[in-house]
Image (spheres, helix red, strand yellow):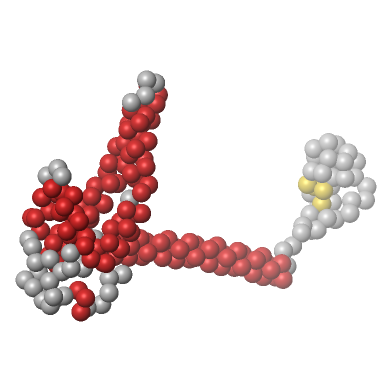
Amino acid sequence: MAYFCSKCGAPLEENAKFCGSCGTKLEAVEPQQTPVMHNDSVDHIKKEFDVVKNNVAERLQNVSNAEWQKKVERDSFVQRFKGRYLTTQGRLNRWAYFVAGIKLFLMALIPYIMLGIGAVMLEADSGAANILGLFLLLPSLVLILPFIAASLMLEIRRCHDLGHSGWIILIGLIPYVNILFYLYIIFCPGTKGANQYGEDPLQQVSYQ
């Protein structure tokens, strides 16, 4: 057991009559027991620690699973986009070409809006507006490039369905003639049965 001075709290030697720190005369000093950590308390603390540790581990696992799921969904979207739009293989019938074009337009709508706003702000007299317009213009151009490439590849596959080489899309660069060209690939039915570019898409699974 440890003994302590009742006035200053300093530890005392056994059978001491005066406090070595403050000099107080000691008469009857009650022994003070050093608190002891019981096994029950230790076990309780360990259990609390294990609960906290398991909760933290579970939350980290949930975060990891959520991030992995997002990565899988993102990779899946990229693969679907490549398979449906960024390819020149095969044929595309009229309805599939129309639906794919609408979807592509909707996906590219935000970059096109950013491009338009950036172009307008570049024409403004304010220097701050010009800088902001430049910051909108550059990323929008980068984002639009894949959609332009996808649009050209859809046209190539539509030309394949009509039995023509993909190079025929260059006609679209000729003013006025390009109007007739796009009316042709939109409304003219493709060749019936298989041709040199693949099987008839109307005889296969519908485009999704």
Residue 118: % across, % down: 35, 34
Q: Quadrant of residue 201?
A: bottom left
Residue 104: % across, % down: 30, 56
Q: Is residue 21 in sight in this rendering?
A: yes
- Residue sitting nearer the eye, 111 or 40: 111
On screen, 29 above or below 58? Answer: above
Q: Quadrant of residue 190?
A: bottom left
Residue at the image position 18 percent from the left and 64 percent from the top: 188
Q: Is residue 82 in sight in this rendering?
A: no
Residue at the image position 27 percent from the left and 70 percent from the top: 207
Q: How many marks?
A: 0
Residue at the image position 44 percent from the left and 66 percent from the top: 65
On screen, 48 above or below 107? Answer: below
Residue at the image position 21 percent from the left and 76 percent from the top: 202
For the C terminus, the quadrant is bottom left
- Residue sitting nearer the eye, 152 or 158: 158
- Residue sitting nearer the eye, 100 or 149: 100
Q: Is residue 67 left or right of residue 156?
A: right
Which residue is at the far bottom?
Answer: 203
Q: Quadrant of residue 193?
A: bottom left
Q: Is residue 199 left or right of residue 56?
A: left
Residue 27: % across, % down: 93, 47
Q: Is residue 85 left or right of residue 34?
A: left
On screen, 53 above or below 25? Answer: below
Residue 182: % across, % down: 19, 54
Which residue is at the far right?
Answer: 27
